[in-house]
Amino acid sequence: MKKLIFTLTLLALFIACEDSKSDKHAMLPTSSGNINNLQVVIDDDLWSGEVGEVIRNHFAATVDGLPQEEPLFTINQLPLNSFDGFTQNNRIFLYVKKGEKKQIKSTKDHYAKPQNGVFISGNTNEELIDVINENALDIISGFKESEMKEKQRRMSLSRLNVQSLKDSLKISLTMPSVYRFAKLSNEFAWLRKDIRTGDLNVLVYEMPLDAFQNEETRMQEIITMRDSIGKKHIHGTVEGSYMITEKAFAPYLFETKVNNRFAYQAKGTWELYNFFMAGPFVNYIIEDKPNNRYLVIEGFTFAPSIDKRDYQFELESIINSIEFE
């Protein structure tokens, strides 16, 4: 009997703790901040010295594949004694403190929801720098994942009906209703969104599974694929002009996963053959064995004279929302 009472008491305490956690989470304020805006909480002397330089080298590094230099994150620095109240509501933050045990701790929904934060401490500058250098790639990956989820959430609030994509190419995407279909067939889809100075574009098409087998020629095969699609479908206003991969710089090529499927990711710059237009692109070639194909999905931006990082991030967020039928 005593054992039963003890067990029931523990169960009641556990339920009470879980309810308390749930209540606390429900009371958290909604996080804030523009997409890819990182709050770095660090005292001014550290920020202006070698620790701050290391942070900037990682978190404000240049984004691959853009025609001009733009940072991974737009950083807002705040000293520790100012990190209070609404300043704690930023969706992603990095908190760096000197004078405590060397360690790193990740946290979710600590001050607001949704929120992804990282606390770093060390007794010396050298210890802080070691922790940052050892963990920067994982921290950046976590922040980017959080920002992509938030972007996808925002896009889902007014979502484009993509039933025709399901019918033709057996996929679904989460994208805002301001996009429209420019072209659609059983083999190819082109969706566009007008912006103030140009447009954002998403292309979807198929390639056979035996394509891209030679590692030594893979990049050239991807360029040839892109250029052939551009010549067939993406034309400029001048006769004989069409989209190609910029010849001056080879694209970056990575291996990754999209919806748990192996994919090649190429990032670079496109241009119009026989005309003066250009911009960045990101191309994913996703292995789709159930449908016996590679599914190719690309996002490219035309936005002259303005920053393009966040436009490309929107396109990547759309691509990574893909669901296969």
Image (cartoon, rainbow, N blue to C red):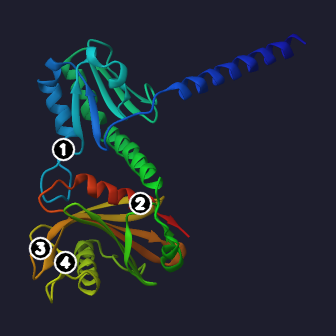
Query: Looking at the rendering, in which quadrant would you find the C terminus?
Result: bottom right
Give the mark, 2 or 3, whose residue is nearer the N terminus.
Answer: 2
Give the mark, 4 or 2, whose residue is nearer the N terminus.
Answer: 2
From the viewer's perspective, is 167 left or right of 39? right
Spot occupied by residue 220 in the image (x, y as percentages of width and height): 22, 76
Badge 4 amino acid: Ile
Badge 3 amino acid: Lys
Label of residue 244 in the image: 4
In the foreground, 67 or 314: 314
Label of residue 61 in the image: 1
At numbered mark 3, what does the secondary structure look like: helix, strand or loop?
loop
Give the mark, 1 or 2, whose residue is nearer the N terminus.
Answer: 1
Look at mark 3 in the image and give the residue it sits on.
247
The quarter holding residue 293 reads: bottom left
Marks 1,4: beta carbons within 8 A: no
| 247, above or below 103, in the image | below
At numbered mark 1, what does the secondary structure look like: helix, strand or loop?
loop
